[in-house]
Image: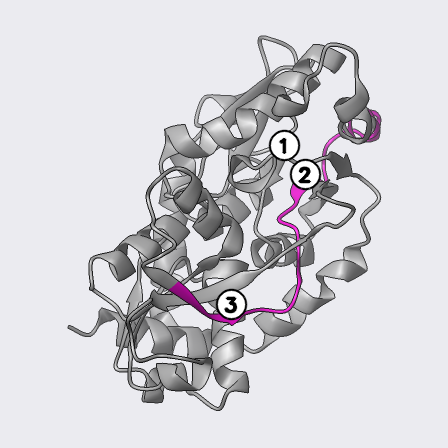
Amino acid sequence: MNRLLKLAGVLMLAVASFVPAAAQSVADGTREHPLRVLLIPADGGTESGTKADYAPVFNAISRTTGLQFDLKVGQSYAAVVEGMCNQLADIAFFGPVAYVQAHKRGCAQLLAVGVEKGASVYYAGMFAKANAPIASIKDIKGKRVAFGDVNSASSFTFQIAMLLDAGIDPVKDLRAIRMTGSHASSLAALQQDQVDVASLSFESYEKAVKEGAADPKTIKVIARSIAIPYPPLALNTRLPEALKVQLKNAFATVHKAPGITPDMIRGYGGRKVDSFDTKFSEGEFNVAATKLGLLTDDFKGRILTKAAER
């Protein structure tokens, strides 16, 4: 617990470094005071890459509404939650678990989730080298496993839940745990033989393959999670109601707005989506909340302690 409290203090200092100037003014979407957007570092963790994923759709919203946005990338999932809950962000892109954390604290409400082929779901996976003697999740016992961010649904929470469901205690039964901080870094650790299994979302894996960063002939899927609610965009609950309505209407219709091309409608990982659903039910995130409930502070602390072992 003390370890987590110390970590929270570090995160607060990190959050303060994101938007010190913006926090001193009231954001209203004007050029002088743009709406502050914080993005979790879901893929790779690089600021330029994460911004590039979401810049197209926010540019589209600017065209249709005249609202201006200032996009910044958090140093971690938890830092984005803290940024939202400490009034340093007006809009945030969360993972499902991070969203549940912020929503429970009363500082975030749903803005929109991406829709692709009529669905708003994605999947977490566990991957190994194609020639590895690992055929199923039960074979992961005794192996070295990479996870992303401790507050990530699809690079940590759902993989831990899958291990527990298979009767594997991550602390007792894994040879080693490596916390890499991001999906892409976990995949890189697998490719560099630093671990035997990597935990990341299928979207992140497919993005790596598309960009030539991973060869699908050399990697195999060991486990696939149940459907997870799509990573959401969320509003700060303290925004004026009229602005909330304007933003929801804009995201609901942006895919069919004049002058907006399909290439601008982007979601998680920069992936093209068909549209955005602004009426997605909060109840859909119960599956993420249930999995999050398995991870007590004490259990997380023991996982992080094992990860620190060398």
* Quadrant assignment, res 170: bottom left
Task: Name the mark on residue 62.
Answer: none
- Distance from label 3 to label 2 (Cα)? 24 Å
Which mark's residue is nearer the viewer, 3 or 1?
A: 3
**Label number found at residue 157:** 3
The segment highlighted magenta reads 220-246
Q: Is residue 250 visible?
A: no
Q: Could you say whether the residue bearing mark 1 is in a helix, strand or loop? A: loop
- Mark 2 belongs to which amino acid? Asn
Give the alpha-carbon distance from disc 2 to disc 1, as whole Å.
5 Å
- Residue 63 placement: quadrant: top right
The N terminus sits in image quarter? bottom left
Residue at which label 1 appears:
90
Circle 2 crowding by C-alpha within 10 Å: few under 14, some 14–19, many from 20 = many
Foreground pick, 247 / 271: 271
Q: Amino acid at mark 1?
A: Asp
Q: Classify 10 Å Cα crowding around label 1: few (below 14), some (14-19), many (20 and above).
A: many
Q: Residue at x 53, y 62 (%)?
A: 124
Quadrant location of the C terminus in the rendered image: bottom left
Percent coordinates x, y for residue 297 in the rendering: 47, 74
Which residue position holds label 2?
236
Q: CA distance from mark 3 to mark 1?
A: 26 Å
For the residues labelled 2 and 1, say whether their Cβ atoms are less than 8 Å apart.
Answer: yes
Q: Position of residue 38 (x, y in %)?
A: 53, 35
On screen, residue 158 above or below 21: below
- Residue 162 in the image, given as x and y percentages of width and height: 52, 77
